[in-house]
C-alpha cells in the first residue's frame, strides 16, 4: 500500500480504503496536509488533544470537502456502545436487539458536538462517519444485501479495551441487523504487535479474551497485536477483511500516540454514496 495524494487537493494526502464494495467510499487520513502546527502537524483531526480548535475545525472541513459530505466525528471513550446516525446527523444508540447488547446506553453524550462512543453506523447515503485513532485500530465497515446493494456502513475505534469489549463485532452485528447479508472491513493504520509493548499482566488479560492479540515485541518483551485481534474478531463474524498492515509507530507520516507526545489524531472515514 502506498500513499496516494487525492487529485486536486494538494497537501491533503489520504489512503483510499479498498475492498468495501460498490456504492461505498472510504479513506484513511495521514499527517500530511492540514493546518495544525508542530507538534501536531499537520492534519490533526482530534478535538481533545490540546490543538488550536480553529485548526482542528479547518482540518475537519478539509476532510468533509474531500468526501463531499457532512461528517460525524467520534469522540472515543473506549467503550462498546454502537450509535446509529440518521439523515439529520442525530446519533442514538442502536437498540439492544440490533447489536446483541442488553446493557447498552440509553442515550449518547456529546462533547463539543461529537458523540462520545467508539462505533457508528448509518444507512443514510451522503452522511460520512469518521473514527479517530493514533495507534488504536480504526476499522471501516460496509454491508451489502444479497443482491450486492449497499445497505449500511460503519466506522469503529478499537483500542486495547475495545478489542476486549468486542466493539467491532457489535458494530458488525448492527450492520447485519440493518440488512447487510455480506459485511466487508478494512483495518486501518495502527500500532503493530512488534511495537505495542505492554506489561505481562495486561497481555495476559487481553489475550485471555482474544487469544490472537498475544504477541512479543521485536526485543522479545510482552506486547499486544491489536490489528491481529480485530482481524480475528472480524473473521469470526464472517466478515471479509483487509488489513492495510501499516504500523503507526513505525511510519513517520502517520500519527502515533506512543511516538509523538503530544500528537494528533488521524481518521478512517466512510460513507454510502448519496
Ligand atoms: Zn510496529
Image (cartoon, rainbow, N blue to C red):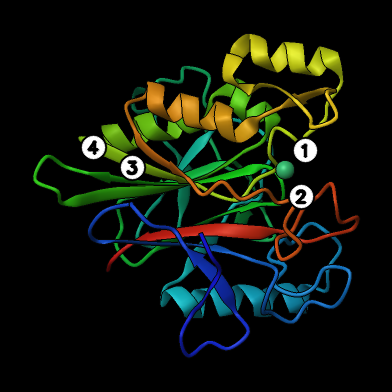
**Do the numbered discs 2 and 3 sit on residues whose CB atoms are within 8 Å?**
no
Q: Is mark 2 within 8 Å of ligand 1?
A: yes
The 10 Å Cα crowd at callout 3, few under 14, some 14 to 19, many 20 or more, is many
**Do the numbered discs 1 and 2 sit on residues whose CB atoms are within 8 Å?**
yes
Q: Nearer the viewer, residue 240 or 80?
A: 240
Q: Is residue 271 above or below residue 79?
A: below
Q: Is mark 1 within 8 Å of ligand 1?
A: yes
Q: Determine if residue 94 is in view.
A: yes
User: Residue 148 at what x, y percent from top left?
Assistant: 14, 48
**Do the numbered discs 1 and 3 sit on residues whose CB atoms are within 8 Å?**
no
Say whether disc 1 or disc 2 marks the residue closer to the N-terminus: 1
Instruction: For marks 2 and 3, give the CA distance.
Output: 26 Å
123 displayed left or right of 149: right
Mark 1 vs mark 3, foreground winner is 1
Q: Secondary structure at mark 4?
A: strand
Residue behind mark 4: 182
Give me the disc on residue 195: 1
Give me the disc on residue 184: 3
Residue behind mark 2: 249
Amino acid at each position: 500500500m502506498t500513499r496516494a495524494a487525492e487529485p486536486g487537493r494538494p497537501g491533503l494526502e489520504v489512503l483510499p480504503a479498498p475492498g468495501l464494495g460498490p456504492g461505498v467510499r472510504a479513506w484513511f487520513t495521514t499527517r500530511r496536509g492540514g493546518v495544525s502546527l508542530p507538534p501536531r502537524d499537520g492534519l490533526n483531526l482530534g478535538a481533545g488533544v490540546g490543538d488550536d480548535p480553529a485548526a482542528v475545525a479547518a482540518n475537519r472541513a478539509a476532510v468533509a470537502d474531500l468526501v463531499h459530505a457532512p461528517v460525524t466525528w467520534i469522540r472515543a471513550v473506549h467503550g462498546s456502545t454502537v450509535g446509529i446516525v440518521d439523515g439529520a446527523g442525530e446519533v442514538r444508540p442502536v437498540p439492544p436487539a440490533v447489536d446483541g447488547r442488553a446493557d447498552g446506553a440509553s442515550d449518547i453524550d456529546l462533547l463539543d458536538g461529537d458523540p462520545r462512543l467508539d462505533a457508528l453506523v448509518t444507512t443514510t447515503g451522503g452522511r460520512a462517519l469518521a473514527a479517530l485513532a493514533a495507534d488504536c485500530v480504526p476499522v471501516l465497515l460496509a454491508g451489502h444485501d444479497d443482491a450486492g446493494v449497499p445497505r449500511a456502513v460503519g466506522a469503529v475505534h478499537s483500542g486495547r479495551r475495545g478489542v476486549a469489549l468486542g466493539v467491532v463485532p457489535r458494530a458488525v452485528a448492527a450492520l447485519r441487523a440493518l440488512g447487510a447479508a455480506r459485511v466487508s472491513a478494512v483495518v486501518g493504520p495502527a500500532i503493530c504487535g512488534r511495537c505495542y509493548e505492554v506489561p505481562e499482566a495486561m497481555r495476559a488479560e487481553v489475550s485471555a479474551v482474544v487469544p490472537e492479540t498475544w504477541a512479543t515485541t521485536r526485543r522479545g518483551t510482552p506486547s499486544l497485536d491489536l490489528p491481529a485481534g480485530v482481524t480475528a474478531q472480524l473473521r469470526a463474524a464472517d466478515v471479509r477483511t483487509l488489513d492495510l498492515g501499516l504500523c503507526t509507530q513505525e511510519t513517520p507520516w502517520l500519527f502515533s500516540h506512543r511516538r509523538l507526545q503530544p500528537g494528533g489524531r488521524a481518521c478512517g472515514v466512510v460513507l454510502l454514496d448519496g
